[in-house]
């Protein structure tokens, strides 16, 4: 059993080692790397995963429903806590309501469960990302605004999510 876990995780450590090695050989600007990942590679992965997903529509709706309930329940609890404790909702609520860790699990899910597991992970994570780039921006900016709407519209991840679900 331990050997099978090691075999599943080994490619991840190899990729991390390669990244570490490249960082020692070349100067890599983190801002540029982050931009390329979030504005190109992640939207491409999201669209492709959602487009080729063989998950039936009813299963997708259940995943969307569960994610939506979890996010809104956390938003409600965070706002309630902030009102009781006097903490700023804008500062506190996003860190409680929105996880930003789904992309970390995608390679492991691909190695462990194959395409089906990745598709489920991508649907859950992208619904969460959709809420981060919509409701999260509204919370952080203190309400709905033109500037917040502009930020939402400029986000490639949001467009990839919408395109992947509707095509």
Image (tube, rainbow, N blue to C red):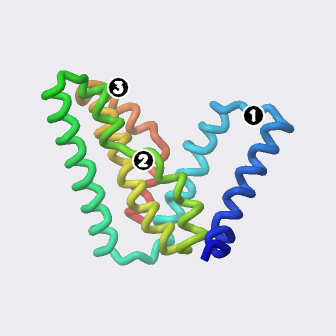
The residue carrying mark 3 is 147
Disc 1 packing (10 Å; few <14; some 14–19; many ≥20)? few
Tell which tag, 3 or 1, sits nearer the viewer.
Answer: 1
| Residue 49 pos. (x, y %) | 51, 65
In terms of depth relative to the viewer, which is nearer, 11 or 61?
11
Please identify the residue farthest to the right as the structure is shown.
25
In terms of depth relative to the viewer, which is nearer, 140 or 57?
140
Disc 2 packing (10 Å; few <14; some 14–19; many ≥20)? many
- Is residue 12 shown above or below 73? below
Tell which tag, 2 or 1, sits nearer the viewer.
Answer: 1
Mark sitting earlier along the chain (3/1): 1
Secondary structure at badge 2 equals helix
Q: Residue at x 27, y 49 (%)?
A: 71
Q: Are marks 2 and 3 in contact (CB under 8 Å)?
A: no
Q: Residue at x 56, y 74 (%)?
A: 114
C-alpha separation, residue under disc 2 versus residue under disc 3: 16 Å
| Residue 112 pos. (x, y %) | 56, 71
Q: In this figure, what is the number of numbered marks?
A: 3
Q: Residue at x 50, y 57 (%)?
A: 46
Left or right: where does residue 155 sit relative to residue 64? right
The residue carrying mark 2 is 158
Q: Residue at x 28, y 75 (%)?
A: 58
Quadrant holding the C terminus: bottom left
Secondary structure at badge 1 equals loop
Disc 3 packing (10 Å; few <14; some 14–19; many ≥20)? few
- Is residue 13 shown above or below 96? below
The residue carrying mark 1 is 28
| Residue 7 pos. (x, y %) | 68, 71
Picture quarter containing residue 76? top left
C-alpha separation, residue under disc 3 versus residue under disc 1: 31 Å
Mark sitting earlier along the chain (2/1): 1
């Amino acid at each position: 059993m331990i050997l099978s876990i090691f075999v599943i995780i080994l490619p991840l450590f190899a990729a991390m080692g390669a990244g570490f090695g490249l960082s020692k050989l070349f100067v890599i600007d983190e801002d540029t790397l982050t931009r390329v990942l979030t504005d190109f590679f992640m939207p491409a992965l999201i669209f492709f995963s959602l487009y080729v997903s063989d998950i039936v529509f009813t299963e997708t709706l259940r995943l969307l429903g569960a994610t939506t309930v979890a996010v809104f329940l956390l938003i409600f609890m965070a706002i309630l806590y902030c009102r009781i404790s006097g903490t700023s909702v804008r500062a506190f609520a996003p860190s409680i309501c929105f996880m930003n860790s789904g992309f970390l699990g995608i390679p492991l899910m691909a190695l462990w469960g194959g395409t089906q597991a990745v598709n489920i992970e991508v649907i859950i994570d992208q619904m969460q990302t959709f809420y981060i780039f919509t409701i999260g921006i509204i919370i952080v900016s203190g309400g709905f605004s033109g500037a917040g709407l502009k930020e939402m519209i400029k986000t490639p991840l949001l467009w990839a999510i919408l395109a992947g679900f509707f095509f």
